[in-house]
Amino acid sequence: MPALGGRRQGREELARTVVDIVDKVPVDFQFVYEDQASLWDKVTAIATKLYGASKVTAIRRFAGKSKSFKMVVMALPVCIAKTQYSFSTDASLRGAPSGHEINIREVRLAAGAEFVVMVCGEIMTMPGLPKVPAATKIDLDDSGKVTGLF
């Protein structure tokens, strides 16, 4: 790994600046759902309050899984896997449409990570990362050139 030199100072200065900004901003953060809400209530809260959906639907397989997950996921957060192009599950509805329907087609329990994934729409999820992701080899050389991409 190349010597850090002045880059270390730059990172430390950036970190201090970020901490200073965060400390000065008033905190008015509120969760979208309660930890102990049911899985369905969590998904509905995310879909309607954040994504502007008018309703949430699910394929038949979800109904059975949500009952079996009920005790396990009571305090687990929910991750919704859907298109990155829209707050809806339809990639052609760009941006932040309202009044759309979120359809859940699959439920996955990420037990090790301690969250539940709701797979929606026609999204394809990525496989897990290897033990050492390729990103760990990306760096800048002393002249500022990016190295380790390929």
Image (spheres, grey):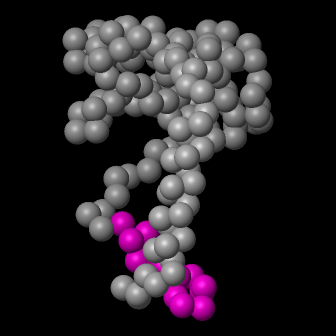
The percent position of residue 113, horizontal first and vertical second, equals 28, 38
Task: Name the residue rendered at 41%, 11% in the picture.
Answer: 34
Q: Is residue 115 visible?
A: yes
Q: Is residue 83 left or right of residue 104?
A: right
Q: Work out whether 9 lies above or below 40.
A: below
Q: Which residues are magenta?
A: 133-150
- Is 83 left or right of 149, judged from the image as shown? right
The residue sitting at 61% across, 9% down in the picture is 55
In the picture, measured across the screen, residue 34 lies left or right of residue 102, that is left
The answer to if 88 sits in the magenta stretch is no
Q: Quadrant of residue 24?
A: top right
Q: Residue at x 29, y 14 (%)?
A: 74
Q: Nearer the viewer, residue 143 or 23?
A: 23
Q: Residue at x 49, y 73 (%)?
A: 9
Residue 136 is one of the magenta-drawn residues:
yes
* Vertical side of 44 occupied by 87: above or below: below
Against 119, residue 129 (above or below) is below
Residue 56, position as x, y percentages in the image? 56, 12
Label tally: 0
Q: Indicate the position of residue 50 as horizontal and vertical percent values.
A: 62, 21
Front in this rendered view, residue 129 or 7: 7
x and y percentages locating residue 150 in the rendered image? 50, 82
Say which quarter of the image contains residue 111: top left
